[in-house]
Image: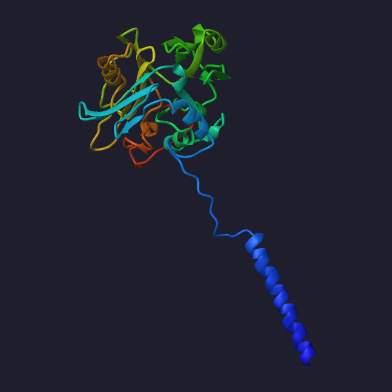
Amino acid sequence: MKKYWNLIYGMTLAIFTIFVLLKVFVLPSKGNVKVETAGIYSQSENTEENEMDTENSSVLITNDSFDDDNIHVKLKQERIADTDVYFVDIQLSSIQYLKAAFAKNTYGRNINEPTSKIAEEHGAIVAINGDFYGFRDYGYVIRNGVLYRSNYKNDTEQVFAIYDDGRCETFLSKDISAQQLMDNGVIQMLSFGPALVENGVVTVQESDPDDLETIAGRNPRTAIGMIEPLHYVFVVVDGRNRESAGYTFYELANVMLDYGCIEAYNLDGGGSSTLYFNGKVINTPTDGITVGEREVSDIVYIGY
């Protein structure tokens, strides 16, 4: 009987020992969680590249600015005509620092993420929502020097081109093919519109600011403008809330012109309008019902 109990005890002890060894060295623990940091100063797979680009720079970062040898960003907020307007003044040493990115780093229809998430994933210093190319199956798409889509819908469609030398221009799609634009040095092509300023002249007509039933009425807005090559401004306008009325295209165009833009273009607006800077959303995105970011298909950003 004693031998029997000794045998059971020995087997139990052996099983327990094996379990402990497996638990410590082999079996995964449900309590272990992979922690991934986000934001422009986090460690990521691009850290070595970022350090290489900036290691010889003196970087100065404040709540409303980023400044190093290659990138100069200054954020300011103004209250104009009962509307909160955010300006991001951007000066670059090279056009390589003005970039675009897709949601989930993937080109395609209906692939969406919040602007802030895409910005964090790409280490953006500052970012705005793009043209929401994925909402439709037409409109030129050139991003970071790659041609993704080359068809257009109608003869009035305007596209905004950013060249490899920092220049910007607006075209009618019917007048030039996407491939021709690529051959001419276009590295970013945005397709939403309308064009707001061309050659220093406002190109949209005045509309009824209270006509909220049409896209031309007062709404949240996002725009990009060129003051001169390599000197740009991102503008985001809050709207659809009690504190901020929003802008018509005409009002937005005049704000861009007054800021000094010789070229300016309207991007996706409404609930999509989002400004991300220094690791956080700066404005108040809303679709008029829910406050918060809308998921979008792409962003335009400044970064390494």
| Among the 4 quarters of the image, the one containing residue 193 | top left
The foreground one among 254 and 15 is 15
Vertical comparison of 295 with 224: above or below: below
Q: How is the image coloured?
A: rainbow
Vertical comparison of 96 with 171: above or below: below
The answer to whether residue 69 of the structure is visible from this angle is yes
The answer to whether residue 214 of the structure is visible from this angle is no
Does residue 46 appear left or right of residue 267 in this picture? right
The foreground one among 175 and 293 is 293
| Percent of width and height locating residue 254 | 26, 16
Vertical comparison of 158 with 282: above or below: above
Residue furthest to the front in view is: 56
| Percent of width and height locating residue 236 | 33, 28
**Residue at horizontal 44 percent and vertical 22 percent from the top:** 97
The foreground one among 84 and 56 is 56
| Percent of width and height locating residue 160 | 44, 15
| Among the 4 quarters of the image, the one containing residue 250 | top left
| Among the 4 quarters of the image, the one containing residue 166 | top left
Residue furthest to the bottom in view is: 1
For the N terminus, the image quarter is bottom right
| Percent of width and height locating residue 299 | 45, 28
Does residue 52 appear left or right of residue 78 in this picture? right
**Residue at horizontal 54 percent and vertical 60 percent from the top:** 31
Tally of numbered tags: 0
**Residue at horizontal 64 percent and vertical 64 percent from the top:** 23
